[in-house]
Image (cartoon, coloured by chain):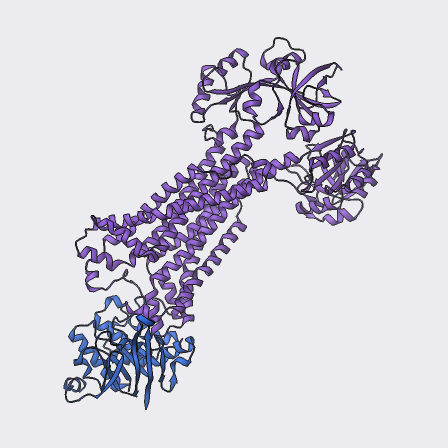
Amino acid sequence: MKNYLELVPHYIRVHRKQNRMSILCIILSVFLVATIFGMADMYIRSMILKTKQDDGNWHIALKHVSDETASMIAARPEVKAFSCYGVLNYRLDMDYTIGGKDTVICGVDAPYVTDIYSGVLSEGTFPQNEREILATSNVRKELGADLGSQISIRDSSGTETAYTISGFMENPSMILRKDVYGVMMNTDAFRSFFPNVTDGEPDDYNSVFMVQFSGHRHLRETIDDIKKQFSLSEEQVTEQAMLLGLLGQSDEGNLFMVSIYSAALLLSVLVLAAGILMIASSLNSNIAGRTAFFGMLRCVGATPGQIIRLVHREALALCGFSIPAALAASMATIWILCALLRFLSPKYFDTMPAFAISPPSIFAGILIGLLTVFLAARAPARKASGVSPLTAINGHVTAAPVRRAANTFFCKVDTSLGIHHATGNRKNFLLVTASFALSIGLFLSFSTTVDFMKHAISVLHPWTPDLSIVSADNSCTVDSALLTELAKHPAVKRIYGRMFAYELPAAANGSQTTVTLISYDDIQFKWGGKYLIDGSVSNAKDHVGTGLIVATPRYNSSSSITTGDTVALTANDGTQNMEIVGVVSECPFQTENGEIILCSEDTFRRLTGLSDYTVIDIQLKRSAADEDVDALRMAAGTDVIFSDRRADNQNVLGAGYAFHLFIYGFLILIALVSACNIINCVAMSVEARRKQYGCLRAIGLSARQLSRMVIAETLTYAVFGGFLGTGVGLFLNRKLFAMLVTTRWHETWSLPVSELCIILIVMILSVVLAVKKPLQNLREMAIVDTISGY
Amino acid sequence: MQILQVNNLCKTYGESAVRVDALKNVSFSLNKGEFCAVVGESGSGKSTLLNLIGALDFPTEGNILIDGQNLFSMNEEERTIFRRRNIGFVFQSFHLIEELNVEQNIIFPLLLDYRKPNPNALNELLSLLDLQDRRHHLPNQLSGGQKQRVAIGRALITDPKLILADEPTGNLDSRNSMEVLDLLLRASRKYQQTILMITHNNNLAVSADRVLHVSDGCLTDLGETDKTEGGFRDEKLS
């Protein structure tokens, strides 16, 4: 041994058991931080993938820009990909068709399919001349076209222009949903095809320029520089805010992203504080048990400074094992989560690496781990350095002097002592209570992200179909017998139809309005029950002449029709009364004009005299294949719109899975850490008093009384920590809610009752778990062993 | 009247090569009001004997009867309650509860039994212990001698059948040692308490009525002490 600090590894090797708790605390803290950062990193990666896949890998789009300016911008070294993007008939209102089906026509440059939507080209090559086009895959399937086939685009005047298919594209979800075709030409071909324009500017061809930059570091400066150099206004430059935000390059003026970053910072500080408290209390307990050892070191000549260095070195030496272990555990957790995501939504997350290493997670884990341990070791080190050398000489180690006696007047002596053990040392009481409170505060703060999630991602309603067969003119013309026929197909899980009567003149409560009447079958009424605000769904289902009004405040804030009202509907050449028997908050249809009333099929048919459906929705079994969808499409015929929403649903589900997994993963981790923290606190407190308990047992304290004493102490921490944590947690919850939700969706904060209940239940369960093991140990302890060295 | 009966008590620690026979076939008994000292070298088995009699540890063989009741035929809860009510402990390191004041420490065994102390008896005991003016003090405000007096008070408060004192003067100076010993003797006389005291101070042992010697786990009864040699005791008590 050349240096007194070399004592540290020897000590750690010999006293593994005493250090176990400290090591566990460090592992937990680092694991939490590394997993949080790792999960956030994976989440951002998945969001970047999704954004690039769904919205394209472009950073800015330029409009009202000349070709000359565009080519100058494209020539800048920072620009990796640059493509013109023009579109015709996007809203399907210009009557361009292929084989009689509406067709969306795009004009782009080659980088659009190679860099900006890199996965879009499934086969073939980008059009090399003005007579070539790319077509969506449904063209191949439905028209039997292949590479090199000729197809003709027919415009509203009936003129047909023939093109050769040079490649096929993946079907975008919009194409499947709307049951249309899509084609893509090069920019020259698009401009030649564009009606009524010759030698125009890009604006004249309904075109913009999409720009993808190389590298992500200085995007902000580059964008600002381009704006300045080419005198582009804010209106001319559209940023892909989601992608820029995810890349950390969002505009500072983007309040929403700033709010997210602020919230993340606040949550990180809370995690750091929880880690410091947890490790500090563990180290404190370790130091307190070695007062005589430090006294001895002081006796043999160690200065207080040397003791501080020794304690710091010990704490850091504990990191040697703990941090790599925690990082390994966190990496394994992240891998499991990624694997889970790939399993749950393979289409959506197939590009996510299975065994990704997250540098931010490793960096944050090491940095915050070391920082936490160093900060946490400060107070115990000072405490150790203040030990008097006398303690080693007289062998009598005194804890902090007790200043007041326990109050045995109100409670039994065991309970009183338990409470006094908790509250006797004010500093310790504050530390432990704060530690409990922080756990609750952390959970309540993080739980705001659930509210954020509910607003940020769209959810699938129970009635969301995979396929829809829609009347071409939105009338009740889809044969109701089709429903019975399609229901027999083995791939169909559920099938349900709706009849629509749009904007029927109506009168209610003395005022005139219009009503869109929609029929529901039994299953739809059952789903509607989940959104019932008032009244009864079964009345509307079972009684003819009754209906449910849809309260859609977003569109129809002035609606005054409610349960019990009678609506006089003019339909089928007559006026008939309908009684409103309930109010629901949502339905599969939205309108800005008038009211929506849901009724049974019998009621609808009696009121309107119509019997066929406007829409037939189909939910498919999990095993359903594309061939099944093709068969259903064939069965539906060509007179209807066959809308395939599977890709849309998959996207929503994928985003939902990712968000749910990460948010609930965070919350579960925090709950777990809260539980560990509580268990750790109680275990350390019991361990610190082990000898005293032994002595009390010797003079007649029964095991049951000892249990009561420990439980009273723990409950004291729990009750005070619970109150403090609830107060602090609700304050932070409200603040974060304002930052994450109110700023964007203007929803007001309400008491998070369920979250509060969950964390309090976790806390109670933790307290039960926390006292169970120490009590068992205490019951089994040999009194003689514990009092002998006292 | 026999209060304590120890029959063929054996205590063995470890097995085979590390086997240590701490006590070997120890048998003796104590009568009510008897003050007995146990002497012996360090590691001879004195403390093991005391721990077994106090039901803090379990014998390998043999049994112990206190007031006719076999300690080791009871379950843990019964044994604890029996100990609380019938055995008083006085430790070398006092083992006072730092969070309780003098009065609370003394009445602690009663509180554990959810009983209220008799105020007169408590005052009398505090007076005997010379702690009336210290009754609301915390242990950290007391001297070593005072702490041990509190511990003796705690041992006496339940009027136990037997008081076990393990080196009660081990942490005290000679003046305080004498005071504590004197107190134990007076208690033994006044309350007819049976006391078993461990010491390796022969000067203290001679103050007892009877002395047992433990060596290598074997107990020898040295018989009653010569009262004339313990003149200081009579002098103090007079």
Image mark count: 0
Can residue A422 be seen here? The reply is no
Q: Is residue A712 left or right of residue A155?
A: left
Q: Is B38 placed above or below A305 here?
A: below
Please tell me which residue lies in front, B65 or A724: B65
Q: Position of residue A579 (x, y in %)?
A: 77, 44
Quadrant position of residue A706 = bottom left
Q: Farthest residue toward the front?
A: B17
Please tell me which residue lies in front, A684 or A539: A684
Q: Farthest residue toward the bottom?
A: B1
Please tell me which residue lies in front, A243 or A525: A243
Colour seen for chain B: blue
Colour seen for chain A: purple
Please tell me which residue lies in front, A184 or A201: A184
Q: Position of residue B103 (x, y in %)?
A: 30, 73
Q: Is residue A667 left or right of residue B221?
A: right
Q: Position of residue A412 (x, y in %)?
A: 40, 70
**Residue at (46%, 16%) from the top-left corner?**
A76
Quadrant position of residue B110 = bottom left
Q: Is A141 placed above or below A360 here?
A: above
Quarter of the figure with the C terminus of chain A: bottom left
Q: Is residue A759 left or right of residue A122?
A: left
Quadrant position of residue A138 = top right
Can residue A386 be seen here? The reply is yes
Q: Position of residue A660 (x, y in %)?
A: 55, 43
